[in-house]
Image (tube, coloured by chain):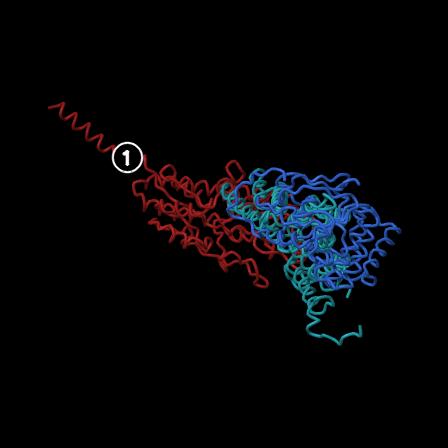
């Protein structure tokens, strides 16, 4: 299969301290990859690097065939201004940016798409509600609807299920699987090991460095998990310059 | 009734001009004011009133008490401060409010210094700021042009502007339009403020931008409705304020702003959305 | 013998000349608060004084805010000339702050003050800190003579050696004042009595009006300090129309737009600029007091006799 992403000796971090250290590997196109690791393991950092918000301290990320506009990213804490007076409909409609652009009108067909997306996430009836009135779960659903409309080929989800109830999680998982069926590449950061084992065929176990990467049942072994837990969480204030080359 | 409401405008040309000026400011400035309020930049107007001083001072040094030169200088200074503050906020950890405060304070100090260099102690700002009762043709055209530019720009930049306010990270991830939109909005704000200062004075300019926006907050849940209501409040304030100034002898600018203030207070108490009414009159809850 | 005597006489001659040589080098340092006052002082003091002005040409003395540099100027001066009549509200503090040992001379001493024009509703206008008293006494040339006399007396007291010079300068100047006074009176005479009234933005010409029979209408609110109300502007316009006031004059320190608006709407003529509180810059039409009075009457005449 063609590669959607390639990490070459990638190091990402803050203030010269690495959060992702010497990562090398390939994400195949159409993959459904869970990214697992302890707190501070660099999972969110990795996603930010892929989106382009963070520049690598070393190494590179290659986006083969995937242009920037073709990436959809759902951050862990969406810095959305909840007090701004827009409706769920308008928020979801933002997903059409790529197609409608600055001035493009929204066609009849696109309106249908918006409505379909809203009901696909179970938010019918909420179109006219302002986003300030939504609960956490409802907000997350709305953001998923927006993602739907973005129609992107690379989808990055950072802990999308935190604080959601079981029904919502189940609905959103259906959506994710639908995307997977449509041959989109999906990376999802998770904390729930059982969920990973049950739903996701491929896993990257990250503890700053890649501990294991491959089929979920091979990766999420007791031995690997122990290794990952032993990673030190805090940045070392007295760290020296890293002399290691490609891992 | 006719005598009270209509005849002042029929009898005096300066009243008609004042009405047109206030109307144009309402059309162009109120929408900008709504966005400023939603972006938590409500105090920017006052900051800008001081920030434009060095520009006006340089204009004064070059051409003396020439209003045109000073206004142009003011606009240049305003742009520099607004855009500089905007860029710093985008590129560094410093947030918009601190960035703007830093810039405008430096600008103000520079302006005072420049004025004192010339030796004359003219209160430049006092001279620079006009009065709604003294609108000559050039000033009217200026205000009307700024209103037109504002409305057009807002119409064009509507989507990225809203997105930039609500979810700037999302905008950044799908498009590069975030920064230019933000800067264009700041430029629009400066244009409205300086043009209005020149024609109408600071109080009126900032007041008619921000008070109607604040009032509209309590009536609308939707952005478009909010803007329409803000414009309406601004227009009503202008008309009623001028009439109050005419019949009661109150200074024109303050009269208009006080009317706007009354409308704001009424909205605060009676407005259905997010005002005090919830606390005062809770009402019985619904079935579902 | 004769050589010794010659030398002795020579030395005596040199010795007697020394004081005047010394004096010629050293000018009397004085400070005047604003340009009109300093013009008087320069004319009376001539070369014997070195005059520093606080509020220069085109400056607005009503809203002036003194700086530390001004305190320094005061500290170095031997005489400080102020107008009085509460024109310089900030002066007392500045004098104290500077610690100057100069004598403070009030130039209007002996002049009978006028009351400021009655405000209809006693509002605004009094951002001047001289509520009640009109400080613009210099606008009447008769008063100017008193200014000049007070200045001469002060200079003589501080520098008795220059008494002759000062008195001669004063006499010369008084002659010039007399000449310009004739011009002013002639100028007024040429204007038909019914047209001897104008609108001006600053209520600064009370003394002129009283001395020469002229009406200056400074409408409430139409000034640098206060903001106008629609009612005020409407009143002025009605008044101009009703009384057929022929001209509106702009003062040299305010925003001309409101006056322009009133003139446009009433068909009144916009006269040129007349100078009230400050002289124009060097090379301008009113760079000395005499030029100022001459300029003002010519502007008035030009606007009202056509």
Q: Position of residue B220 (x, y in %)?
A: 75, 62
- Relative to residue A165, is residue C205 depicted above or below? above
- Relative to residue B160, is residue A173 depicted above or below? below
Q: Is residue B161 visible?
A: no
Quadrant of the image containing the C terminus of chain B: bottom right
Mark 1 Cα shell of 10 Å, populated few (<14), some (14-19), many (≥20)? few
Q: Position of residue A98 (x, y in %)?
A: 79, 45
Q: Foreground residue, A117 or B179?
A: A117
User: Going 64% across and 56% down the picture, which residue do you hit?
Assistant: B42
In the figure, what tint was chain C given? Answer: red
Quadrant of the image containing the N terminus of chain B: bottom right
Q: Residue beneath label 1, please?
A: C20
Marks counted in the figure total 1
Chain letter, colour blue in render:
A
Q: Position of residue B175 (x, y in %)?
A: 74, 44
In the image, farthest residue toward the right: A108
Q: Foreground residue, C197 or B70?
A: B70
Q: Position of residue B222 (x, y in %)?
A: 76, 59
Chain letter, colour cyan in render:
B
Q: Under tag 1, what secondary structure?
A: helix
Write down the chain letter for disc 1.
Answer: C
- Give left or right: position of B29 versus C130: right
In the image, farthest residue toward the bottom: B284
Q: Foreground residue, A118 or B34?
A: A118
In the image, farthest residue toward the left: C1
């Amino acid at each position: 299969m063609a590669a959607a992403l390639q990490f070459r000796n990638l190091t990402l971090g803050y203030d010269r301290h690495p959060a992702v250290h010497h990562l090398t590997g390939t994400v195949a196109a159409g993959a459904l990859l869970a990214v697992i690791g302890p707190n501070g393991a660099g999972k969110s950092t990795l996603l930010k690097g892929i989106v382009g918000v963070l520049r690598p301290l070393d190494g590179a990320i290659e986006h083969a065939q995937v242009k920037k506009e073709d990436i959809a990213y759902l951050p862990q804490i969406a810095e959305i201004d909840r007090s701004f007076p827009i409706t769920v409909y308008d928020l979801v409609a933002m997903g059409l940016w790529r197609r409608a652009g600055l001035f493009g009108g929204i066609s009849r067909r696109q309106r249908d798409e918006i409505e379909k997306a809203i009901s696909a996430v179970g938010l019918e009836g909420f179109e006219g509600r302002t986003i300030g009135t939504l609960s956490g779960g409802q907000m997350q659903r709305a953001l998923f609807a927006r993602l739907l409309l973005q129609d992107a080929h690379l989808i990055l989800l950072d802990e999308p299920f935190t604080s959601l109830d079981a029904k919502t999680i189940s609905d959103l998982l259906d959506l994710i699987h639908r995307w997977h069926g449509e041959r989109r590449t999906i990376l999802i950061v998770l904390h729930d090991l059982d969920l990973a084992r049950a739903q996701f065929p491929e896993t990257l176990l990250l503890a700053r460095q890649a501990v294991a990467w491959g089929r979920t049942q091979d990766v999420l072994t007791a031995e690997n998990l122990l290794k990952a837990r032993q990673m030190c969480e805090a940045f070392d204030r007295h760290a020296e310059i890293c002399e290691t080359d490609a891992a | 009734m006719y005598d009270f409401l209509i005849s002042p405008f029929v009898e005096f040309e300066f009243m008609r001009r004042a009405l047109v000026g206030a109307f144009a400011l309402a059309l162009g400035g109120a929408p900008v004011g709504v966005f400023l309020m939603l972006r938590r930049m409500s105090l920017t107007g006052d900051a800008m009133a001081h920030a434009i001083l060095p520009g006006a001072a340089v204009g004064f040094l070059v051409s003396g008490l020439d209003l045109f030169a000073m206004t142009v200088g003011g606009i240049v200074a305003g742009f520099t401060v607004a855009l500089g503050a905007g860029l710093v906020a985008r590129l560094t950890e410093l947030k918009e409010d601190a960035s703007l405060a830093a810039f405008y304070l430096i600008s103000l100090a520079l302006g005072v210094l420049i004025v004192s260099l010339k030796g004359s102690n003219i209160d430049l700002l006092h001279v620079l700021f006009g009065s709604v009762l003294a609108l000559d043709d050039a000033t009217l055209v200026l205000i009307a042009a700024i209103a037109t530019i504002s409305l057009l720009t807002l119409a064009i930049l509507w989507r990225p502007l809203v997105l930039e306010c609500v979810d700037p990270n999302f905008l950044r991830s799908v498009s590069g339009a975030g920064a230019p939109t933000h800067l264009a909005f700041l430029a629009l704000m400066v244009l409205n403020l300086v043009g209005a200062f020149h024609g109408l004075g600071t109080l009126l300019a900032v007041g008619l931008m921000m008070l109607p926006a604040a009032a509209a907050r309590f009536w609308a849940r939707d952005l478009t409705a909010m803007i329409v209501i803000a414009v309406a409040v601004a227009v009503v304030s202008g008309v009623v304020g001028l009439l109050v100034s005419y019949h009661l002898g109150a200074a024109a600018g303050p009269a208009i702003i006080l009317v706007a203030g009354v409308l704001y207070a009424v909205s605060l108490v009676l407005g259905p959305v997010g005002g005090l009414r919830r606390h005062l009159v809770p009402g019985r809850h619904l079935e579902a | 013998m004769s050589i010794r005597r010659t030398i002795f006489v020579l030395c005596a001659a040199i010795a007697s000349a020394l004081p005047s040589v010394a004096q010629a080098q050293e000018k009397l340092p004085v400070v005047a608060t604003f340009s009109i006052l300093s013009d008087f002082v320069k004319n009376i003091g001539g070369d014997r004084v070195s005059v520093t002005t606080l509020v220069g040409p085109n400056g607005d003395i009503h809203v002036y805010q003194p700086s530390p540099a001004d305190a320094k100027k005061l500290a170095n001066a031997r005489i400080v000339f102020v107008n009085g009549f509460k024109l310089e509200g900030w002066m007392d503090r500045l004098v104290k702050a500077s610690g100057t040992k100069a004598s403070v001379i009030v130039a209007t001493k002996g002049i009978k003050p006028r009351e400021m024009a009655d405000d209809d509703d006693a509002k605004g206008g009094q951002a001047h800190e001289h509520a009640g008293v009109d400080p613009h006494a210099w606008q009447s040339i008769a008063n100017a003579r008193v200014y000049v006399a007070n200045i001469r007396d002060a200079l003589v007291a501080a520098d008795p050696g220059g008494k002759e010079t000062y008195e001669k300068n004063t006499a010369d100047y008084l002659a010039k004042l007399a000449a310009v006074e004739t011009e002013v009176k002639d100028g007024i005479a040429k204007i038909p009595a019914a047209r001897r009234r104008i609108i001006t933005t600053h209520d600064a010409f009370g003394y002129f009006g009283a001395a020469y029979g002229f009406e200056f209408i400074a409408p409430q609110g139409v000034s640098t300090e206060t903001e106008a109300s629609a009612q005020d502007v409407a009143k002025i316009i009605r008044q101009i129309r009703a009384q057929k006031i022929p001209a509106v004059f702009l003062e040299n320190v305010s925003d001309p737009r409101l006056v322009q608006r009133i003139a446009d709407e009433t068909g009144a003529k916009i006269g040129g600029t007349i100078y009230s509180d400050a002289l124009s810059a060097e090379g301008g039409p009113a760079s000395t007091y005499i030029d100022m009075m001459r300029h003002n009457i010519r502007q008035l005449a030009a606007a009202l006799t056509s």
